[in-house]
Amino acid sequence: MLKTRVITALILMAVLLPTLFLLPPIYIGGLFLLVLLAAAWEWSRLLAPEASPSAWIYAVFCLVIILFLLGMQNASWQFALLLLAVLFWFFVAPFILAKGMNLSLQKLRPFYVVLGLILLPATWFALVFLRELGLIFLLSMMALVWVADIGAYFVGKAFGKRKLAVQISPGKSVEGAIGGLLLCYVYAFACVYFFSFESTLFGAWAIRFGWIPMFLMVTVLTAFSIFGDLFESQLKRLAGVKDSSHLLPGHGGVLDRVDALIPTMPIAALLAGFV
């Protein structure tokens, strides 16, 4: 399994790195689009595993929504989609997560169908917008999610005792979440120190609003990266599966790899609008 994971990771890096650093931004948008459409396909399969053809139709619907909003002359529609996604994460997702496994996927299936058509396109628009602000701007935001995950994993392994959400994800601990947050603070400080202020969201917020608002922003983004992970874990448990698919050998599905990006990228994109 470890060998498979390493080989898959190397192939992904061989595709991602040249696209990011050598090709024009339009190719990055295309790569992100393929990733989000694959995630949409997996999302539909979680909701209705017995209806495989509908998963392709669902992915096409996501594509149509993205193309339609791209074709609109007024970017306010794209902003409205981002805002709708962010409002969900702030005001609805916490109540869904609080329910644990006391939910019926069969009853909530229409809700999740509509939800995916909002969250996944919103994530794509957020990623593209952040790339327009600069490659470092985009990568620094994506890396925050990875730093939070790495910190939570190792601190949780070493010190984790209190379960964060035992019904949804028994492996996650409160100590791990705190460890991930502290590492994110260090990471954000390093970004401000080593990069120019305008090249990262952390630097832009620190110079405009001060250090305390910047660290509060990091707290929010880190918390919602955990929310995204828990939300997908909850959906998988409700669907009775371990992985969202087997598209990435040794890693599970695409949705498993981007779940924490789905809430954080739209939030980061809206926060970037303030600077």
Image: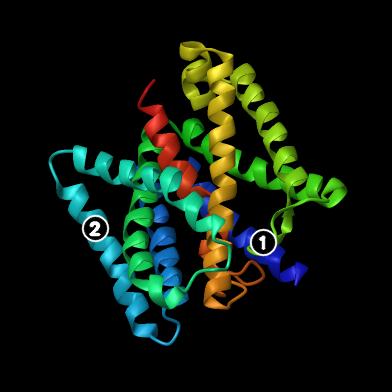
Q: Quadrant of the C terminus?
A: top left
* Residue receiving disc 1: 169
Horizontal and vertical percent for residue 136?
A: 51, 31
Please identify the quarter of the rendering in which residue 55 is found. bottom left
Is residue 275 in view from this perspective? Answer: yes
Q: Disc count in the image?
A: 2
Rendered image: mark on residue 65 = 2
Q: In the figure, 68 relative to 41: above or below? A: above
Task: Tell which residue pokes out farthest to the right in this image.
Answer: 158
* Front in this rendered view, residue 68 or 95: 95
Quadrant showing the N terminus: bottom right
Q: Earlier in the sequence, mark 2 or mark 1?
A: 2
Q: Could you tell whether 10 is left or right of 60 in the image?
A: right
Give amino acid for label 2: Ile
Left or right of 150 on screen, residue 188 = left
The residue shown at (38%, 85%) is 51
Say whether residue 32 is left or right of residue 218: left
Residue sitting at x 46%, y 12% = 208
Quote the CA–CA distance across marks 2 and 1. 32 Å
Element type where label 2 sits in the image: helix
- Residue at the image point whose x is 66% and y is 28% from the top: 185
Q: Residue at x 57, y 68 (%)?
A: 101
Q: x, y (%) of residue 179?
A: 75, 39
> At numbered mark 1, what does the secondary structure look like: helix, strand or loop?
strand
Taking the view exactly as shown, the residue that stands out farthest to the bottom is 50
Identify which residue, 162 or 239, lies in the foreground: 162
Q: Nearer the viewer, residue 222 or 200?
A: 222
User: Badge 1 local density, few (<14 within 10 Å), some, or many (20+)?
Assistant: some
Whether residue 23 is visible here, answered yes or no, is no
Q: Amino acid at mark 1?
A: Ser
Residue 178: x and y, percent? 72, 38
Can you tell which of label 2 and label 1 is closer to the viewer?
Answer: 1
